[in-house]
Image (spheres, rainbow, N blue to C red):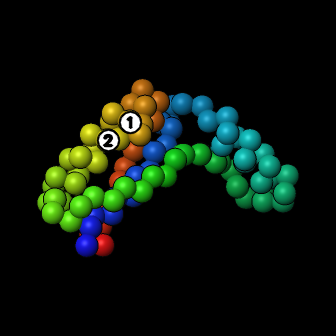
């Protein structure tokens, strides 16, 4: 068994998302007129050894996101932790 961490990184609401705007325009042109907004992001999966406590996994997950996966100036992150 191990710990499985799913990390979601998205731009902060105050940051413009040109990629999301491009996808929204494309969807609208394809006939999906009900789509009124798109925000793009990143998804990362991490595996941790089973010997760690859930608290340690969460602490290390926060550190990894802060130091590597997310730019704290323009991005937010959240993650889920599961025992596999």
Asked which quadrant contains residue 49, the reply is bottom left
The residue sitting at 33% across, 33% down in the picture is 67
- In the image, residue 75 above or below residue 28: above
Per the model, the C-alpha gap separating discs 1 and 2 is: 6 Å
The percent position of residue 66, horizontal first and vertical second, equals: 33, 36
Label 2 neighbourhood size at 10 Å, few (<14), some (14-19), many (20+)? few
Q: Kindly identify the residue that appears in the image at 45 percent across and 52 percent down.
A: 44
Q: Quadrant of the N terminus?
A: bottom left
What residue did someone put label 2 on?
Answer: 64
Relative vertical location of residue 21 with respect to residue 52 in this rendering, above or below: above
Q: Are marks 1 and 2 in contact (CB under 8 Å)?
A: yes
The residue that label 1 is drawn on is 68
Q: Is residue 22 left or right of residue 31?
A: left
Q: Is residue 15 above or below residue 31?
A: above
Identified at 27% across, 64% down, the residue is: 3
Quarter of the image that includes the C terminus: bottom left
């Amino acid at each position: 068994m191990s710990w499985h961490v799913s990390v979601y990184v998205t731009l902060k609401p105050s940051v413009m998302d040109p990629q999301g705007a491009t996808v929204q325009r494309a969807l609208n042109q394809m006939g999906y007129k009900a789509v009124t907004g798109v925000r793009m992001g990143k998804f990362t999966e991490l595996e941790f050894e089973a010997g760690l406590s859930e608290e340690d996994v969460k602490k290390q997950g926060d550190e990894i996101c802060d130091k590597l996966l997310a730019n704290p100036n323009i991005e937010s992150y959240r993650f889920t932790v599961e025992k596999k």
